[in-house]
Image (cartoon, rainbow, N blue to C red):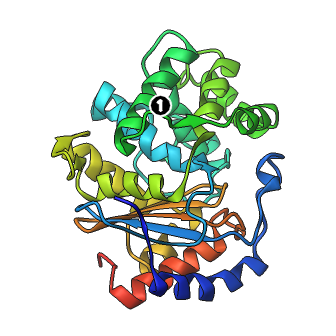
């Protein structure tokens, strides 16, 4: 079913787009720095197959940290929650997503949650397989199943750009390896992780993934269960408590839905039992979230009473 343009959403996008003037693209990753800061688009995917949108929803972008939710779901299915949470915690942090500070003060030195970079690297480390290619194929197959599209791939330019500039993530990996939380070659893990972050899609694809999470892991169009409901529940809980970096508390109060952002400017929302949201707006605030995307969600949540709380 084609995605229908919505006049109502167009007005909200127009109002939120003013915020792009106050944001900045993630130019510390050179390829992401090429994005147009004025872009803003949204798609909303309903369980009955309907979709409404505004903006250039066909424009592709990379998942970046949104991929952390998907890799977590995959690893929970492959390893089980006791295995996963023995190695990564469940608690929010007030620190930036790429901080090493808490690792140095925690004993054992396991990351606080899977949504910060240290935790996400540990989760990616748990993806089963003997090679980067095999492990990445497992993740990509899962993403393709969520969307229902076998053509989904990754952007090699972005992956390479991230790999070459991933010195903070290298530092996190070496610290985690020293404490035996990670037990593989650091460059191998970063190769896999940067490919994961560079998986590419558009707003409609992202909204569809959000819709699967919103429907507790079931694809309502086919009736197929793609992930157990408990896995979907755990992921949505992390999206509420940690999904918007160290702005998650404010986001929960102002907007109140499970959501995950990425530094490419993407935001995936999952309104429980109702619909999925995909947003792309590459101008970021100081926390690394899409500045106009958050404003757009504020307007949506206020107008349609989306908050869970």
Where residue 229 appears, as percent x and y from the top left, is 20, 47
Q: Looking at the rendering, in which quadrant would you find the N terminus? A: bottom left
Q: Is residue 207 left or right of residue 222?
A: right
Where residue 59 appears, as percent x and y from the top left, is 62, 57
Residue at the top extreme of this rendering: 130
Residue at the front extreme of this rendering: 2
Looking at the picture, tell me which residue is in the foreground, 60 or 303. 60
Q: Looking at the rendering, in which quadrant would you find the C terminus? A: bottom left
Where residue 9 appears, as percent x and y from the top left, is 48, 81
Query: Circle 1 — which element?
Result: helix
Looking at the picture, tell me which residue is in the foreground, 2 or 187. 2
Q: Residue at x 59, y 43 (%)?
A: 200
Q: Is residue 170 left or right of residue 103?
A: right
Looking at the picture, tell me which residue is in the foreground, 174 or 256. 256
Residue 205 in sight here: yes
Q: Is residue 214 left or right of residue 65?
A: left
Q: Count how many numbered circles sit on residues in the image.
A: 1
| Position of 117 relative to 262 (above/below) | above
> How many other residues sit within 10 Å of disc 1, few (<14), some (14-19) or many (≥20)?
many
Where residue 114 appears, as percent x and y from the top left, is 47, 44
Quarter-of-image position of residue 40 = bottom right
Residue 114 in sight here: no
Q: Residue at x 49, y 20 (%)?
A: 135
Q: Is residue 243 left or right of residue 172?
A: left
Q: Residue at x 30, y 52 (%)?
A: 212
Quarter-of-image position of residue 277 = bottom left
Q: Residue at x 73, y 39 (%)?
A: 158
Quarter-of-image position of residue 2 = bottom left
| Position of 74 relative to 51 (above/below) | above
Q: Which residue lies under the disc numbered 1? A: 140
């Amino acid at each position: 079913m084609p995605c229908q343009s919505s006049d109502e959403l167009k007005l909200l996008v127009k109002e939120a787009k003013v915020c792009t003037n106050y944001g900045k693209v993630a130019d510390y990753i050179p390829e992401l720095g090429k994005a147009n800061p004025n872009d803003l688009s949204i798609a909303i995917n309903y369980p009955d197959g309907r979709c409404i949108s505004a903006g250039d929803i066909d424009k592709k972008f990379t998942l970046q940290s949104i991929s952390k939710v998907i890799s977590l779901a995959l690893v929970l299915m492959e390893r089980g929650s006791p295995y996963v949470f023995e190695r990564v915690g469940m608690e929010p942090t007030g620190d930036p997503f790429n901080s090493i500070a808490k690792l140095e003060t925690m004993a054992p030195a396991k990351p606080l949650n899977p949504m910060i970079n240290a935790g996400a690297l540990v989760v990616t480390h748990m993806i089963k397989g003997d090679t980067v290619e095999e492990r990445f194929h497992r993740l990509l197959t899962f993403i393709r199943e969520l969307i229902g599209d076998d053509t989904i791939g990754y952007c090699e330019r972005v992956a390479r750009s991230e790999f070459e500039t991933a010195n903070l993530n290298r530092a996190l990996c070496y610290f985690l390896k020293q404490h035996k939380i990670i037990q593989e070659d650091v460059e191998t893990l970063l190769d896999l992780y940067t490919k994961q972050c560079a998986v590419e899609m558009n707003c409609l694809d992202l909204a569809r993934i959000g819709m699967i999470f919103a429907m507790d892991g079931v694809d309502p169009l086919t009736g197929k269960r793609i992930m157990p409901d408990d896995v979907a529940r755990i992921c949505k809980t992390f999206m509420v408590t940690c999904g918007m970096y160290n702005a998650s508390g404010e986001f929960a109060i102002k907007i109140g839905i499970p959501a995950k952002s990425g530094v490419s400017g993407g935001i995936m929302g999952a309104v429980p039992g109702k619909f999925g949201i995909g947003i792309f707006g590459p101008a970021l605030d100081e926390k690394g979230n899409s500045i106009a995307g958050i404003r757009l969600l504020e307007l949506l949540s206020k107008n349609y009473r989306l908050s869970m709380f």
